Structures are given as structure tokens and as C-alpha cells.
Image (cartoon, rainbow, N blue to C red):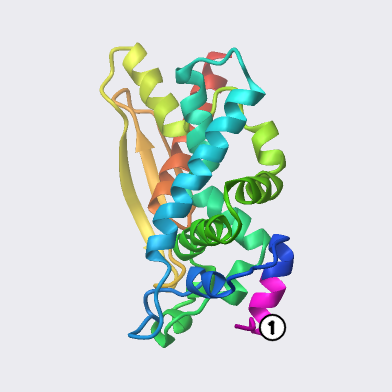
Amino acid sequence: MKLAADLQALSTRLGHRFDRPELLVRAVTHSSRAGANREDNQRLEFLGDRVLGLVMAEALLAKDKAASEGQLAPRFNALVRKETCADVARELDLGAALKLGRSEMLSGGRRKQALLGDAMEAVIAAVYLDAGFDVAKDMILRLWGARIGSVESDARDAKTALQEWAQARGMPPPSYTEVSRDGPDHAPNFVIAARLENGNSAEARAGSKRLAEQAAAKALLATLEASQS
């Protein structure tokens, strides 16, 4: 099987030549394009998530031999979460090679974070099945690169840090409220407000509720820290 030009270019960017190119075709095929003769990438996504997790767990253990499980877990989560996978996919221009149904194409599927993150995990699985764990590991470490070395020593997300701040002061967890939503369906923008029982609050805008909540929590933490300095 000969790869189409877009998949050949993706293979080059991945740094891997497929002996079984049909694996790469499946990895970039979204369920909206799948059919009786074309399998989608969901099963590969499931496998790739586990391969990525093992590679990152090993890398983090090797990087900091003194770190506790409590320190390693948030770093691990920061490296394997869907947003990080989507960021790597964007750097590879993976969206240009996605095989999508017409509805997904018209709704901006090539730019959707969830689709990109899922496809990145599926591509990892395709390389793993084509060439084995060591080759997949080398590719992952190369693509994630500086992210592994620069992951924060305490990578707790902002929402967790804000909740711990509140609990340490005898407050209930912060609340998150959707203030507004605008933009087209395929690329919405959310404004989320984070509020504490004592009345402190902050708002932030992002392209998903999760990211907006994180940004609002981060903004509120910054306000709290400034008020204490």
C-alpha cells in the first residue's frame, strides 16, 4: 500500500517510515469518515494513550529519582492530557492529514482539540504496532522534547491549587460559572467566573470550558497572591 502525499509528508514529520502504512491511514481516520471498508482510529487511540502513559511514567522516574508519587502524578497528568497531545499534533500539522466526514470538515474538525488529541494518541499506537515499543518511545520522547524537561516541579493545575487554598482556610471549594459563550459552534469561546465564598472572584476566556475554568482559577490565585504581598 502506497501512502497518499499528505500521509507521506506526515510520516516524514514523524520520523518513521511505516512497513504497514495502513496503520497510519487508520490512525488519522475519524469515525465520521469510517465505513464498512474503513476502520476508524478509536481502538488505536485507546492503545496509544497507554503507550504514551508508560513512556512518560518511565521518563519522569528517570528524570527525578527522588520525587514522590504525589509529585510525579501531576507532572504525568500535565504531559499526557488531551491538550498536550493536541499541541504536539498541531506542531506536526496532523490536522492536515485527518480523514474526516463532510460534517466534521465543515465544522472545523481539523482544528478541534479533541480530534487532534485523539489522533495523536492513535498515531502513537500505529507506530507502536508497526515497529515496537522502543521505536514508539523514541518518537514520543523526541516529539514531547522540552516539555518533559520543563514540566513544573509542582504541576498541579490551577483549579486544584485554588481548591487547596480555600480548604486551608476553612472555605468550601470554589465555584465556576459560565458567564457567556460566543463564536461559531466549531470554535466557541467561553467566559468562566471562578468565585470563593469570601467574595473574591476572577473571570477568564478560552476555547473550552475546561481551559476557561483553569484560566479563571489561575487569575484568581494571582489576585490572592498579590493581595497578600
Q: Position of residue 127 (x, y in %)?
A: 58, 59
Quarter-of-image position of residue 36 = bottom left
- Mark 1 highlights which residue? 5
Residue sitting at the far left: 172
Magenta stretch: residue 228 in it? no
Q: Position of residue 194 (x, y in %)?
A: 37, 37
Instruction: Estimate how packed mark 1 is, as few (under 14), some (14 to 19) or many (20 or more) residues with alpha carbons within 10 Å.
Output: few
Q: Main secondary structure of the magenta part?
A: helix
Q: Which quarter shows the N terminus?
A: bottom right
Give the camera-side residue of 171 and 134: 134
Quarter-of-image position of residue 37 = bottom left
Q: Position of residue 188 (x, y in %)?
A: 43, 65
The answer, for residue 219, to whether it is visible in the render is no
Q: Residue at x 32, y 51 (%)?
A: 178
Q: Which residues are magenta?
A: 1-10
Magenta stretch: residue 7 in it? yes
Q: Is residue 3 above or below residue 127?
A: below
Q: Position of residue 46 (x, y in %)?
A: 39, 55
Q: What is the count of numbered marks?
A: 1
Give the camera-side residue of 13 and 134: 134
Q: Residue at x 74, y 68 (%)?
A: 12
Which amino acid type is shown beneath numbered disc 1? Ala
Give the camera-side residue of 229 and 42: 42
Q: Residue at x 64, y 76 (%)?
A: 7
Give the camera-side residue of 5 and 37: 37
Q: Is residue 52 left or right of residue 167?
A: right
Q: Secondary structure at mark 1?
A: helix
The answer, for residue 68, to whether it is visible in the render is yes
Q: Residue at x 35, y 84 (%)?
A: 35
Q: Is residue 73 above or below residue 20?
A: above
